[in-house]
Amino acid sequence: MSRFEKFLAGWSFRSSTPDYAVGDVIEVMVTGDEGDTAVARIGDSTLRIEGAPDDAVNTRVLVAVDAWDEASHAGTGTYRETVGKSAF
């Protein structure tokens, strides 16, 4: 193994379109809303969050994924709890 290969060992690239399975519970930053529904954008993916509080924008929340479409990289989830505020 070359020094370069040793240096890069364990490195991987992150996708801008992550995929989730129904039932996954993930922590996301709520980036906006569409009407009465909170929205989290994760890379190029979009997750609509049902049941989020009215002041959820710019907070970190736990969401249970209810549906996920791998082709469009979009899904819906159910709000679980707020776990933090934005650092901005």
Image (spheres, rainbow, N blue to C red):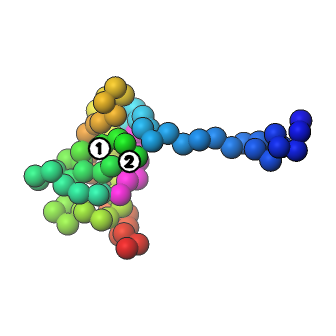
Give the x, y percent position of residue 6. 83, 43
Secondary structure beneath disc 2?
strand
Please name whichever residue, 37 or 2, is drawn nearer the observer in this view of the structure.
2
Residue 2 in view in this figure: yes
C-alpha distance separating marks 1 and 2: 8 Å
N-terminal of the pair, mark 1 or mark 2, is 2
In the rendered view, tell whether residue 79 sits above or below residue 73.
below
Mark 2, other Cα within 10 Å: few <14 / some 14–19 / many ≥20 = some
**Marks 1 & 2, CB-CB < 8 Å contact:** yes
Residue at left offset 19%, top offset 55%: 33
Q: Give the residues in magenta.
A: 24-29
Asked if residue 8 is positioned above or below residue 69 in the image, the reply reads below
Which of the pair 8/23 is nearer the observer?
Answer: 8
Q: Which residue reaches farthest left?
A: 35
Compared across the picture, whether 23 is left or right of 6 comes to left
Point out residue 8 in the picture as x, y percentages from the top left corner. 75, 44
Give the quadrant of the N terminus: top right
Task: From the image, tell me which residue sits under label 1.
Answer: 47
